Image: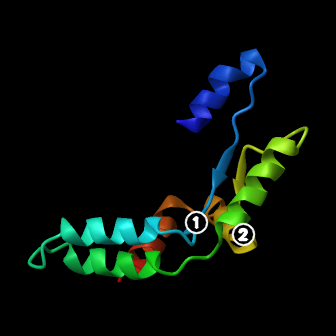
């Protein structure tokens, strides 16, 4: 959606920038986990996947201050990039994903969920 919005607003000289934070140290992770586990019955074939996802969500990789610095960088730059990742490892991961084929991305995602 943001990429389409960027194209639509370009004619008005309005820049659209995406800040892509990963898991941030806020109470949102707890809210997400509680909701996900409450709507996934223990007898569900998806329960094990939900529990694995919950474990990943509980490991924040950045703080709200990190995200704020990235936003300030994006809005202060004369020629902003289309996308900003907050942490160095997130930037490496995103660049790697763009280089990989979709089939390999799918396999990696499946492996992460095991």
Q: Is residue 31 above or below residue 81?
A: below
Q: Which mark is residue 69?
A: none
Query: For residue 88, what is the image quadrant?
Result: bottom right
Does residue 86 appear in this view?
A: no
Q: x and y percent of residue 68 in the render?
A: 72, 57
Residue identifier under label 1:
22
Q: x and y percent of residue 38 in the render?
A: 20, 69
Residue identifier under label 2:
87
Q: x and y percent of residue 33 in the render?
A: 34, 71
User: Is residue 46 left or right of 98 when viewed as pictured?
Assistant: left
The C terminus, quarter of image: bottom left
Identity of the residue drawn at 28% across and 74% down? 50
Badge 1 marks a residue whose secondary structure is loop
Q: Is residue 2 above or below residue 27?
A: above
Q: Is residue 11 above or below residue 71?
A: above
Mark 1 vs 2, N-terminal side: 1
User: Is residue 80 left or right of 37 when viewed as pictured?
Assistant: right
Q: Nearer the viewer, residue 83 or 21?
A: 21
Q: CA distance from mark 1 to mark 2?
A: 8 Å
Q: Residues within 10 Å of mark 2 (few under 14, many from 20)?
A: some
Q: Nearer the viewer, residue 46 or 65?
A: 65
Does residue 30 appear in this view?
A: yes
Q: x and y percent of residue 42 in the render?
A: 13, 79
């Amino acid at each position: 959606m943001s990429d389409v919005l960027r194209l639509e607003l370009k004619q008005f000289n309005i820049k659209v920038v995406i800040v892509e934070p990963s898991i941030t140290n806020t109470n949102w992770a707890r809210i997400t986990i509680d909701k996900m586990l409450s709507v996934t019955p223990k007898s569900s074939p998806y329960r094990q996947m939900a529990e694995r996802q919950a474990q990943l969500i509980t490991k924040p990789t950045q703080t709200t201050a990190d995200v704020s610095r990235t936003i300030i960088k994006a809005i202060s730059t004369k020629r902003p990039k289309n996308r900003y990742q907050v942490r160095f490892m997130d930037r490496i991961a995103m660049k790697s994903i763009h280089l990989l084929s979709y089939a390999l991305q799918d396999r990696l995602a499946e492996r992460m969920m095991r």
